[in-house]
Image (cartoon, coloured by chain):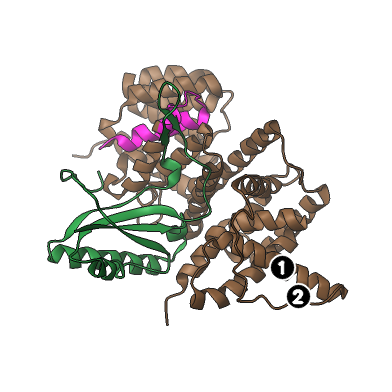
Chain colours: A green, B brown
Amino acid sequence: MLYSILIYGTEGLFDKLSPEAQEALLGKHRHLQETMRDKGKLGPFARLMPTTTAVAIRGGGKAPLVTDGPYAETKEALLGFYIVECDSLEEAIEAAKLLPLDVGTLEVRPVSWFGGEHLHAGA
Amino acid sequence: MADTSWIGAALAAARPRAVGALMRHFRDIDRAEDAFQEACIRALRAWPDNGPPADPTAWLIFVGRNVAIDDLRRTSRLGPLAEDHDVAVQPDMEGYLDDRDYRDDVLRLLFVCCHPDLSVTDQLALALKIVAGLSVQEIARAFLVAPKAMEQRITRAKRRVGAAGLPFETPSTAERTQRLTVVTAMIYLMFNEGYASAGGDAHIRVALCDEAIRLLRLLLGLFPGQSEVMGLLALCLFQHSRHRARLDRDGALVSLDDQDRSLWDQAAIREGRVLIEKALRKASPGPYQIQAAIAGVHCAAASAADTDWREIDRLYAALQEFDPSPVVTLNRAVAVSKADGPMAALAMIEPLSQALDGYFYFHGARAALLEELGQLDQARSAYQTALTLCSNAVETALVEKRLAGLDKKTAVPVG
């Protein structure tokens, strides 16, 4: 089964962390990536740009309406995600626990289907 | 013990909204800051065990407000003391504040810092202290003054703003637009304060740029349709993406042509590019968007030689429509010199000689063009004029280097 690990948190919080705390946080991400990669169970993962870069697309009257999205939420925003392959929900939860838990909320949500080609990271 | 550095970051991230809301509540800057400070102390006590509340900003506003009200009661002996809500306060904040409140609260907080009676430095110091939450020491370091002097300045500035009366009524649409323009210009100055002068503590200067970018992201989040805020954020991201390449090991300024482009922050460049694309969709151009587009062309070039100078020339022509100032023409001339050669550029800037006679960059650019044309004596004289107009050691060093280069060219070859 494929699971997504969705990372929610306050935007801009990472930038306010000290370089050491940032490094510690990224270290946990690398740890998850290495752990899952070693098992051949690591799918795509992404860190999203701030919501200020996003547009929202809604069905309009005649044509789809592209807007700048809602006003900034003070609540948590989707910051990034992983797709991992796990044998059970338990295993997916254990994998998610490798990530930093104090800077946001994680959601483990099973993946219904996914596809894609390999893209150059960070391009 | 669990790492709690995230709490400090969360408090800092919540600060502009929380202090803005508390200022509306108390109609007083100091009381709002104190209430936020108190709420932060309670957060540091409660959050490590309980974890962060679902909505930290609302939590801080609620607790800050109650603590301050209790203080008022205690000192004025009004009514009974409320129960201690140290840890227990986890109210359902849903709907307590909606984003429209935040929008005007944050804008108001920034706007009061821009009071026209204050000098630019005082405006920036106030915004860095109240909105960004930088310490007086940090702000003093940024402006190269003693902490005590900075403390007095900030206190004085606050008193002045308070005496002038804080604008608490909900702004009209026109007022909101006007406030946004004033505030955006102030944040641009904050960025430039960090970006333009390379003197002093490089670390704190980068921090000023970071704060300006953070405030622009916040504003854009609250006013998502503002294409000029998008443009300015993109501009700052593009400029700041080069900060690691702009100074050499000795702290000397490295010109764009000579920078190691592998040091440019590609994530910042990508974010800037997306914002420009987003802004362009609105078909509502403005000077910040055009300047951002110019900076974006530089950032897109793999090397100085690959720069699309024709495009930059076109963009400067568009910028002249908004801002027909001689400085814009001077900048355009640099692009023209790369696209059409130094002769055309020189012809473009000669008419500016009176308007820009006291401007360092005019004489520096003119000298470089003359040097390129091989008119070395005139170039030397222009560099020497530039030397008298330098405003910091980094600029002086740059001109002296160019003069030394001239000397080598004119020296009679030996042997």
Q: Nearer the viewer, mark 1 or mark 2?
A: 2
Say which chain tag 1 marks: B
Split into 4 quadrants, where in the image is the N terminus of chain B?
bottom left
Residue B404, can we see it?
no
Q: Is residue A16 left or right of residue B222?
A: left
* Label 2 element class: loop
What's the amino acid at mark 1? Asn
Where is residue B348 drawn, in percent x and y?
45, 18
- Please tell me whether residue B342 is drawn above or below residue B170 in the rendered image: above
Say which chain tag 2 marks: B
Q: Is residue B203 left or right of residue B302?
A: right
Residues in magenta, as a range: B278-302
What's the amino acid at mark 2? Ala
- Please tell me whether residue A92 is drawn above or below residue B21 in the rendered image: below
Q: Are marks 1 and 2 in contact (CB under 8 Å)?
A: yes
Q: Which residue is mark 1?
A: B66
Q: Is residue B116 left or right of residue B392?
A: right
- Could you classify mark 2 by the number of other residues whose Cα lies within 10 Å: few (under 14), some (14-19), or many (20 or more)? few
Query: Is residue B391 inside the magenta stretch?
Result: no
Q: Residue furthest bottom?
A: B1
Query: Is residue B300 inside the magenta stretch?
Result: yes
Give whichever of discs 1 and 2 has the lower sequence position.
1
- Please tell me whether residue B302 is drawn above or below residue B371 in the rendered image: below
Quadrant of residue B306 in the image?
A: top left
Residue B323, can we see it?
yes
Q: Residue drawn at (35%, 49%), measured in percent from left and top? A: A48
Q: Which residue is mark 2?
A: B82
Marks 1/2: CA distance?
A: 9 Å
Split into 4 quadrants, where in the image is the C terminus of chain B?
top left
